Image: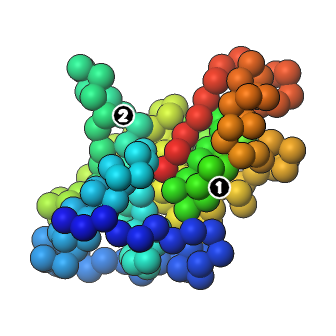
């Protein structure tokens, strides 16, 4: 396993539309090695998720967390060629998102609160599932990377874009920064 260099905002790879991975290649040493290296990189930088373009690989592969098991341990999904379908565009969840490719920054983003995902897992098996809440936000954030979209592209009010420390300091009681938020919500891939 290797810890890979994380591409930062401004690097062209983060704005590319990524290529699908041939399902026959999912169990190949190259793809399996990339998955292992992405896990090591995500752990090194304490991320909740990581997309392949963030480690300079323009392929449709993400690792997404946000879910926990019965003991409260973080669970991760490896998704290859994922397709995300919004279940209800009107039911939205807002939180300050962060990204390993934009270190030290946070921005308030509102996303659909529930999605259906269709993808291949790390063994090449087809998986389909639904997610709600924080795990749904993580999946959407990571899958955005596969289409060259960063969370900053989804911020509708740039007054709600800040350095992490300032967001923690000034928006802790009002995460939305508009006196309407009622819970502290942060996400970091």
Image position of 15 (left or right of 20): right
The answer to which of 185 and 93 lies nearer the viewer is 185
Q: Earlier in the sequence, mark 2 or mark 1?
A: 2
Image position of 55 (left or right of 98): left
Quarter of the image holding residue 93? top right
Rendering coords of residue 186 (x, y %): 59, 35
Image position of 104 (left or right of 71): right
Image position of 85 (left or right of 172): left
At x 43% / y 63%, what residue is drawn?
51
Cα gap from disc 2 to disc 1, whole angstroms: 20 Å
Rendering coords of residue 132 (x, y %): 48, 33
Secondary element type, mark 1 = helix
At x 41% / y 46%, what residue is drawn?
46
The numbered disc on residue 151 is 1
Q: Is residue 6 above or below residue 137?
A: below
Q: Which residue is mark 2?
A: 67
- On the rendered image, what quadrant is the N terminus found in? bottom left
Secondary element type, mark 2 = strand
Determine if residue 46 is in view. Answer: yes
Q: Is residue 124 above or below residue 175?
A: below
The answer to which of 147 and 75 lies nearer the viewer is 75
Quarter of the image holding residue 35? bottom left
Q: Is residue 110 above or below residue 32?
A: above
Quarter of the image holding residue 120? bottom left
């Amino acid at each position: 396993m290797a810890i890979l260099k994380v591409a930062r905002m401004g690097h062209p790879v983060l704005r590319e539309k990524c290529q699908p991975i041939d399902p026959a290649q999912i169990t190949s040493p190259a793809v399996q090695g990339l998955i292992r290296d992405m896990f090591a990189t995500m752990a090194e930088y304490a991320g909740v998720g990581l997309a392949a373009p963030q480690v300079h690989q323009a392929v449709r592969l993400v690792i997404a967390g946000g879910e926990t098991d019965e003991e409260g341990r973080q669970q991760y999904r490896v998704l290859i060629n994922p397709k995300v379908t919004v279940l209800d565009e009107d039911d939205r969840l807002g939180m300050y998102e962060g990204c390993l490719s934009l270190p030290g920054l946070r921005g308030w983003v509102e996303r659909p609160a529930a999605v259906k995902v269709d993808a291949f897992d790390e063994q090449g098996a087809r998986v389909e599932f639904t997610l709600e809440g924080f795990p749904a936000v993580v999946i959407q954030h990571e899958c955005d990377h596969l289409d060259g979209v960063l969370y900053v592209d989804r911020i509708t009010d740039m007054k709600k874009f800040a350095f992490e420390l300032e967001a923690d300091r000034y928006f802790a009681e009002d995460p939305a920064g508009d006196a309407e938020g009622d819970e502290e919500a942060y996400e970091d891939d």
